[in-house]
Image: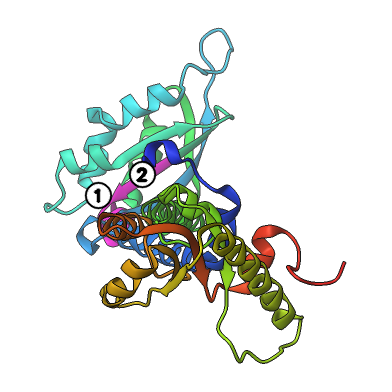
Amino acid sequence: MKEIRYADAGMDMKKWILWLIRKSWVALAAALIGAALGGAIYAAARTVPESEREYQAVSKLYLDFAVDETGEVYQEYNGYTWNDLMVTDPILDETMSCLSEDYTREEVMAATEATILSDLRLLTVTITTNDRERSDRILAATDQALENYGNSAKEFVQIQTIQATEAQLVVADSRLAQAVGIGAAIGLAAALLGLLLYYVLDDRILVASDVRQATEVPFVGYLFGEGREETAGGQFLSEQRLQHDYEASAACLRERCGEVLEIRINRKQDAAMEELEQARKACALILAIPYGQIHGTYLAYLIGQYQARGCQVLGIAIENADIQFLNRYYGRAIGKEQ
């Protein structure tokens, strides 16, 4: 009896692709589920609790620089300078004086950012806190403190607030589309990997190559039950041709070996053993196995059982195969006139 070595058996790629096409709905469903899960997980992770939400208020101030003793305009202020100035006593003290006692210096310092973007005369102040109202009040106090500073510092003629916006919720850039795409890709990859693993482990017998992987007993053909009606597409003619090929192969075996008994194995495979006495008398057998219902490992076991009882298994046939699958697998309409 042939020992089945799955690691050396290889893969019938054409059979795998045809099988995968029939299972494409599984991959599609997995991709849709993955996309839905990816979007849901992203939405859940992106949802920030109310207590952790940030609100930003922004103002722009115009800096009217004074001239120094040489007649040159003071221009030593930059973004880093202003971030340092905002937390020093002259400005911070003014800011705190415009706020109620429930505001702390640490809170105001942590919330404030001052930036010079391109024009040294244009200062952008950003206040960020977890409360909309507090952001607005700190911004108003900071603007007032800067205007007062502009009136007292020798480097400025004045500092004037030219624009101030109310605090807005900080919204992160949406990555929903990317999350959905990644979820769909992961779902599709997982489905294909699962289908591949299932195909590798599934040794059900569908075509002649599956028989050759399971046993050295030759494949003698496809056979079909009697009484089939002709259908569109010439399926009846195809089945008739395959049945004829099988009968011709079986006749050759009978010419060489004499009486050959055909045993049809049904889903209840143990029922085939009921014909054992008749098989012993015939000595030579053809086992007809149902399409897609018998695994290669069981077929090898069954052949071994018959051989152990003195029966010679001359051939394996596949019964009631899917003729449409065979047409696609062999690349032409079997039995049709060319």
- Give x and y (percent) for residue 292: 45, 68
Q: Quadrant of residue 327?
A: bottom right
Q: Quadrant of residue 38?
A: bottom left
At 23% across and 42% down in the image, what residue appears? 108
Q: Is residue 107 above or below residue 78?
A: below
> Which amino acid type corresponds to the residue marked 1 in the rendered image?
Cys
Q: Is residue 143 left or right of residue 10?
A: left
Q: Is residue 112 left or right of residue 210?
A: left
At 34% across and 49% down in the image, what residue appears? 139
Give the Cα distance between marks 1 and 2: 87 Å
Q: Secondary structure at mark 1?
A: loop
Q: Quarter holding the C terminus?
A: bottom right
Which residue is nearer to you in this view: 97 or 309?
Answer: 309
Query: Mark 1 and 2 residues: CB-CB less than 8 Å, in contact?
Result: no
> Which amino acid type corresponds to the residue marked 2 in the rendered image?
Ile
Q: Is residue 226 left or right of residue 241?
A: left
Q: Secondary structure at mark 2?
A: loop
Residue at the far right in the pictured view:
338
Q: Which residue is mark 1?
A: 98
Q: Provide the residue span drawn in magenta.
A: 125-138
At 80% across and 72% down in the image, what residue appears? 336
Q: Quadrant of residue 112?
A: top left
- Give x and y (percent) for residue 173: 46, 51
Q: Is residue 306 above or below residue 76?
A: below
Density class for disc 2 (Cα within 10 Å; few <14, some 14-19, many ≥20) is some
Q: Is residue 194 left or right of residue 19?
A: left
Residue 19, magenta (yes or no): no
Which residue is nearer to you in this view: 231 or 241?
Answer: 241
Which mark, residue 4?
A: 2
Residue 128, magenta (yes or no): yes
